[in-house]
Amino acid sequence: MEEMNIQGLDYNTRREALLMPEYGREIQKMVDVAVALPDRDERLRCAKTIVKLMETKVPQIRENTDYQQTLWDHLYLMSHKQLDIDWPYDVSSAEKILSKPEPMPLPQNRIPLRHYGQLVRELWDKLKTMPAGEERDELARLTANQMKRDLVQWGHGSIDDEKVADDLARFTDGVIQLDLGSFSFERFVPDAEPMGKRNGKKKK
């Protein structure tokens, strides 16, 4: 469908996209006028008036402690960095407002059995490098009990002692071998509903 060319009617589709649409097109026009003013002092007076109007357009901006800095940063950007005045605030970092945040890196340490969690993974790595002795035996005992606690809480398949012993040996590269004939696990009382099933339960 073709647009009717009616004199005095200004179509949004023909207008330049606003850099800061929250302030509206009239404020942008004022900024353009200020940039074109020949007198430097007059440009500054005009800029101060525009900033006051910008504040009324977005009154919630006052909730920020540094909102005046933000307003002048916005004015600088709306002028396409062409407004030549003695800026009352440092606007050198204003462009950071328009920059997108860097994507967060994904964790590189893949946890073989997620229900054990990162803490247990770190304990496995620690046990692999510790010298044999009472300190390593105690850490192995704590780790084994934490692993069984995790299995109980998550209700992840079999929670017998052999599974814990097998996993502990496998993920410490065979360094830790539990003697189930003499090793005694702490007693755990599982929740009425395992965590894994609880998290996946649909609300009615």
Image (cartoon, rainbow, N blue to C red):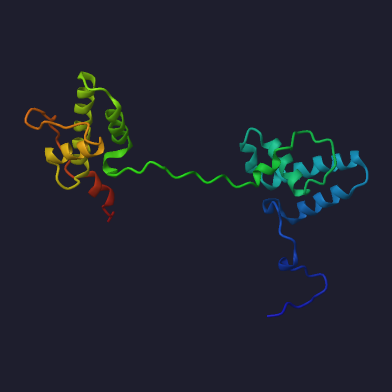
User: Residue, x 32% and y 33% (percent of image)?
Assistant: 122
Q: Say whether residue 58 is left or right of residue 136.
A: right
State the image coordinates of residue 196 (x, y, percent, origin top left). Answer: 25, 47
Q: Quadrant of residue 127?
A: top left
Query: Relative to the observer, which residue lies in front, 26 or 119?
Result: 119
Q: Say whether residue 123 is left or right of residue 31.
A: left
State the image coordinates of residue 139 (x, y, percent, origin top left). Answer: 23, 25
**Residue found at the far right of this picture:** 38
Q: Is residue 149 above or below residue 11?
A: above
State the image coordinates of residue 64 (x, y, percent, origin top left). Answer: 62, 36
User: Residue, x 14% and y 45% (percent of image)?
Assistant: 158
Query: Relative to the observer, which residue lies in front, 128 or 152?
Result: 128
Instruction: Please give the count of numbered marks on the rendered protein.
Output: 0
User: Residue, x 76% and y 51% (percent of image)?
Assistant: 27
State the image coordinates of residue 155 (x, y, percent, origin top left). Answer: 19, 45
Query: Relative to the observer, which residue lies in front, 97 or 175?
Result: 175
User: Residue, x 28% and y 30% (percent of image)?
Assistant: 128
**Residue found at the far left of this picture:** 181
Q: Quadrant of residue 41?
A: top right
**Residue found at the far top of this picture:** 134
Q: Say whether residue 193 is left or right of residue 81.
A: left
Say which quadrant the N terminus sits in: bottom right
Say which quadrant the C terminus sits in: bottom left
**Residue found at the far bottom of this picture:** 1
Q: Say whether residue 125 is left or right of residue 39.
A: left
